[in-house]
Image (tube, rainbow, N blue to C red):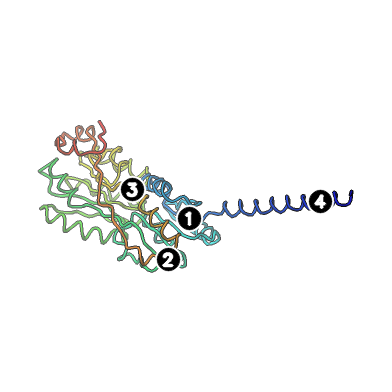
Amino acid sequence: MEVVQITAKKDTLNLISMCVCLSLLLLAKDAVADVAIVKSAGVSAFDEARNGFSSICFENKQEFNLLEDLSNKDQILEQVRAGNFSLILVLGSQAASLIRDNIPDKPLVFAFIIDPEKQGFKKDRSTGVALKVQIREQFIILRSIKKSIKRVGVLYTRPVNDALIVNARSAADDEDLELVTSPITSSLDLQQALTDLLTRVDALWIPPDPLLNSEEATKYIGSKSLESKIPLVGPSDRYTRSGAIFSLFVDTVETGRMAGDFANKILQGTPTSKLPFREIEKSKIVINLKAAGLLGLEIPRNIQDAASKVYQ
């Protein structure tokens, strides 16, 4: 009888041990991230899109923040390759280009990319949310605020935004405006380029741009434009807070949700080639009445009524 009891206890202990091991294995599997999120660091729009993505895609995620000078790109590439992720979400052109060019064997979902096909994103391995920049609409709003504007300056990064500037010239021509361009290739060029540009234009327009997204760049451009009494139109809420009279931009959270929907479908087995690129049609306008007042400008009531946020 005693031998039988000892044997039974051993069998019970073995069973418990097996269950514990199995549970640990399952926990370890659950702890592995299925989705890598690679984005430029310090850009609030990308953080908001990430939150939108996470609200609809519930897989485990690991986030990588790419520095503006790309000094940590090799470390990020090494970690993403080692992570054995099922899918990679990229937010912004710098992060997207880095992953597209260096990790071609993983499904890619992108957001905030202008003209993705022209930038080399192939539908057989990527899909996502293209960024539609409503350039003409911004010029129309600008003109409704100050009809005397003729020369609009633009800072942008080459070659990232060369195609966008071609479209901007066409939109400016349609509105009888002259577009005065000042391309930069590094954030180190910003101070000189902006100083020169502000002496030659009636207004300043900043498009979505990887080198002009940081808080430091935004505050600098906002303060200098106000000092020079030049109305500024920006690509984000952050620019409006920093001195732009208004910004017109896509809904960042909805952009993230749309990317999350793509990710869910890919993880469930749908090939990227069956998921056409999409655009967010709805835009938000945010206005800064204080900045406008400092410049002696009055923002029309219909624009104020349409604004999703108004800074007094």
The amino acid sitting under disc 2 is Asp
Residue depth check, mark 3 versus mark 1: number of the one nearer the observer? 3
Q: Which marked residue is nearer to the observer: mark 1 or mark 2?
A: 1
Label annotation for residue 8: 4
Mark 4 burial class by Cα count in 10 Å: few <14, some 14-19, many 20+: few
x%, y% of residue 147? 10, 43
Residue 200 seen in the figure: no
Question: Where is mark 1, residue-wise?
Answer: 36
Three-letter amino acid code of the residue under disc 1: Ala
Q: Earlier in the sequence, mark 1 or mark 4?
A: 4
Q: Is residue 149 left or right of residue 241?
A: left
Q: Secondary structure at mark 2?
A: helix
Residue type pointed to by label 3: Glu
Secondary structure under tag 1 reads strand
Kindly identify the amino acid type of the residue bearing the numbered disc 4: Ala
**Which marked residue is nearer to the observer: mark 1 or mark 4?**
4
- The span from disc 3 to disc 1 (Cα, nearest Å) is 19 Å
Question: Which residue matches tag 3?
Answer: 254
In whole angstroms, how far apart are the C-alphas of marks 3 and 2? 27 Å
Foreground disc of the pair 3, 2: 3
Identify the mark at residue 156; answer none if there is no mark. none
Q: Which residue is label 2 attached to?
A: 101
Quarter of the rendering occupied by the C terminus: top left
The residue depicted at 18 percent of the width and 47 percent of the height is 201
Ranked by sequence position, the earlier of labels 3 and 1 is 1
Q: Earlier in the sequence, mark 2 or mark 4?
A: 4
Instruction: Using the numbered discs, state the Cα–Cα distance from disc 2 to disc 4 in whole angstroms.
Output: 60 Å
CA distance separating discs 1 and 2: 16 Å
Relative to 311, is 1 above or below? below
